[in-house]
Structures are given as C-alpha cells and as structure tokens.
Amino acid sequence: MIKFKNYYEILGVTPDSTNTEIKSAYRKLARKYHPDVNPNSAELFKDITEAYTTLITPEKRKQYNILNGFFETQKTNTSSQKAQQEYHQKATSTPNNKEKNYNSAFENKKNYSEKIFSDTINDIFKEFTQNEKKKKKKTEEPQNGSNITTDITITFAEALKGTTRTINVLHTHQCNKCQGRKFINDSKCSECKGKGEISEYRKITVKIPEKIKNNAKLRLKGEGNSGINGGKNGDLYLIVKIENNSNVKYEASDIYYNVPITPFEAALGGEIEINVPDGKIKLQLPSRTHSGQKFRLSGQGIKQNNKSGDIIITVHIEIPQSLSDDEIKLYEKLKKISSHNIRENL
C-alpha cells in the first residue's frame, strides 16, 4: 500500500480551500523555500511543488481526495457518504485495479509538474526580480540627507548683543563598510552592528546674530545628515531659546526691566544702579516712589536703522530676606509713629 503525503498539510491549507488560497499559499512557500533562495530546502520545495501541482487542478485534486479520504466540510452528508463509498470501493479493489487507479491519477506527473512549476515560479521570480531591481535602483540613486533640528539656549545678554557657540550635534550617515546593507556575508556588519548607519557627534561653531528673538530658527545649510550616492547633505536647524528671565525682556527696540527697590529708597528717593548688557545705568528715584511706578530712559535702548529705542524701568518695593536687629527696631518705631492708613480707599 502506497502511503500518500498530506498535501494540504504541506501547503498549510484545508480541503475547503479555494484554488486562489492554494495558489497564494504556494507562492509564499515558493518564495521562502526555492533552492535559489534557500539551498538547504530542495527536498521540501519538491514536496511543496508536488502538492501544488496536484491540488491546483480540479480533476487531480478530486482523485487525490478520494484516494486519501479528504472531504470538504461544506458538502452535504449525502455527498460525503458518496465520496466515502467511492473511496472504499477503490480501496478494496484488487491490487491491479488499485495500481491502475494510482497510475491514472498521477500519470504524466513529471511533465505536468514541470509545466505548472514553469508557469507559476516564473511569475514569482519575475515579480521578485522586478522588486530587487527597484530596490537596487533606489539604493543606487542619489539620496539627499535628512535635516537635523536641535535647540540652543542663550542668555538675554547674548541674545541682545549676539554671540558665538560651539555645539555638539548628533549626525547619522550610511555605514561605509556595508554600504547600508546591514549584513556582510550573511553576518551583521561589525562596523554598524547591523544598523546600516552610524551616528556620531560632530562639533559645529554657530554664530548667533544680535537682537535675536526667542524661538527664532537658524538654518545652517549642508550641516545636516550626509547624502548617499552623491546626494546633497541635509540642513541643520537651530531653535534659539532665550533663558527665562522675568526681570528683563525686549520688544522691537525697547528694553523692559523690572527692578526691586528697598522701602527707604522708595520713601526717600535717591540714585540707584541697574546692570544692563553694556554695563550699568543710573536712575534717579524721586522721594515717595510707589511700587509699580515706571521710568523711561529715552535713546538708551536697542540701536537699529539709525534709531535707538528706550529703556523702560518698572520698580517694585521689596523687603530684604534678612533684617538686622537695628533695622527691625527702626521698623517698630516707624510703626508706632505712622498715622497713615494706606488701605482706607480699598
């Protein structure tokens, strides 16, 4: 008794599978196990092709099902019983008849298999070859490098006057050893560890122009990631962040300062010094200065287009964090002699 192979199991389908499903399963397996792709799978590929050439043709599939007792579940019980009866009749026939049935079911198998294989595998490898050509063409075409975007933080003074910074920027380029293929001789590339690209930091000196605004974007042409096959390098974009300083800002040509003063400076007035990017400026406070009072210094702001803006100073009274015993005594004395109710108009 000849023992037939389970063609449905080999292809990973069921007796209910359609020709379309069988063909799809075969194409997937052929791509994976063809000897040109996987030299160690010649015997398995032979079984796969044998299973396909039998199941793809209705008459041969029907004979194979009868000889091996496979029945489609969607058939009626009467059809299943009839198919089983046909199977048992053939199974209990004389050896000569069984041999005749077997030979009839698989006659000219070699020629038929070659034809099916030729029609299907040629389609598969035609598609495979076309895809490989497209991939090769794509990898050989010049490809521009990608852009890099990173932040850089500067002080208010640097933003106002301009500065120069040297920064480290992470660049990525194609691995020169494996040419981006990730593998060499079926082994991971030792240079890029199978990534196909290498990342490394590069120092770049950047000139920050004066009077730059917060979140301004600077473009450094060609300082991005490297191009491939002669493609252009990408660009580097720097997003400029100005350190948060609630005491100073500038708008257009004017500079705004929030300046703390002591209670006695507010009450008595006097000259105070204020640190600015160009050094120090002096402001004469009048007596009885109140918190929130503004003072404008004309022409001492930012110079641009042959004109100078202003400096606008807003003062607010602030009590020192630590007071000496003598200071506390003076405040106590002031409390006793003061007759003002500054909240009477609330």
Image (cartoon, helix red, strand yellow):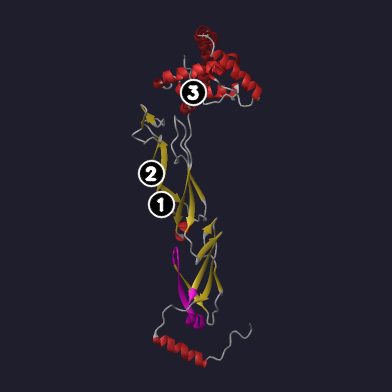
Q: Position of residue 116 (x, y in %)?
A: 54, 13
For residue 165, which numbered disc appears in the image? 1
Which quadrant: the C terminus? bottom right
Q: Residues within 10 Å of mark 2 (few under 14, many from 20)?
A: few
Marks 1/3: CA–CA distance: 66 Å
Marks 2/1: CA–CA distance: 14 Å
Q: Secondary structure at mark 2?
A: strand
Q: Is residue 282 above or below residue 217?
A: below
Residue pointed to by mark 3? 10
Closer-to-camera residue (49/181) = 49
For badge 2, the amino acid type reads Arg
Closer-to-camera residue (157/240) = 240
For residue 202, which numbered disc appears in the image? 2
For badge 1, the amino acid type reads Arg
Marks 2/3: CA–CA distance: 55 Å
Q: Residue at x 47, y 52 (%)?
A: 209
**Which range is magenta?**
260-279
